[in-house]
Image (cartoon, helix red, strand yellow):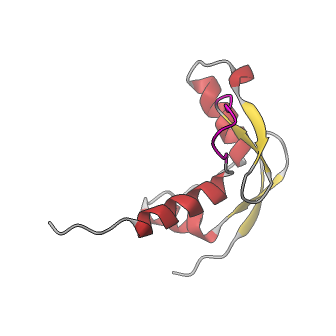
Amino acid sequence: MSFVDKTLICKDCSCEFIFTAGEQEFFHAKNLINVPKRCHNCRILMRVQRNGANPDNTACVNCAECGAPTQVPFQPKGYRPIYCGPCFRLKKGQANEALPQTKT
């Protein structure tokens, strides 16, 4: 099945966000049928509120890779780079590919 990036509208902040082909593949692999209704930042805020934490402890920072503003559920200390959701997944995927494969 071929997936193409889709532009969606966040139900909370009414901003456009991209539902990437990679995210769609993940949803398909997990048999998730509903598309996301919230952008990355609003999903983080909703998760923080659902866990009973104070949303004031979140921080809005710029992604170290692409410069896009992103919300994180913690106060960064400044000594590690912060990435937006898509850049974080890309970095995580590259790190997993670099790990040596072990035989079982």
What secondary structure predominates along the stretch shown in magenta? loop
Task: Using the image as rendered, state which of residue 6 and residue 76 is in the foreground.
Answer: 76
Residue 32 image offset from top left, x and y in percent: 49, 57
Residue range (magenta)? 74-82
Task: Using the image as rendered, state which of residue 36 and residue 96 is in the foreground.
Answer: 96
Magenta run includes residue 75? yes
Q: Is residue 4 left or right of residue 33?
A: right
Image quadrant where residue 2 sits = bottom right
Residue 54 image offset from top left, x and y in percent: 67, 18
Image quadrant where residue 67 sits = bottom right
Q: Is residue 72 above or below residue 32?
A: above
Q: Is residue 62 above or below residue 66?
A: above
State the residue at coordinates (60%, 32%). 47
Residue 38 shows in this picture: no
State the residue at coordinates (74%, 21%). 56
Magenta run includes residue 34? no
Q: Residue furthest front?
A: 79
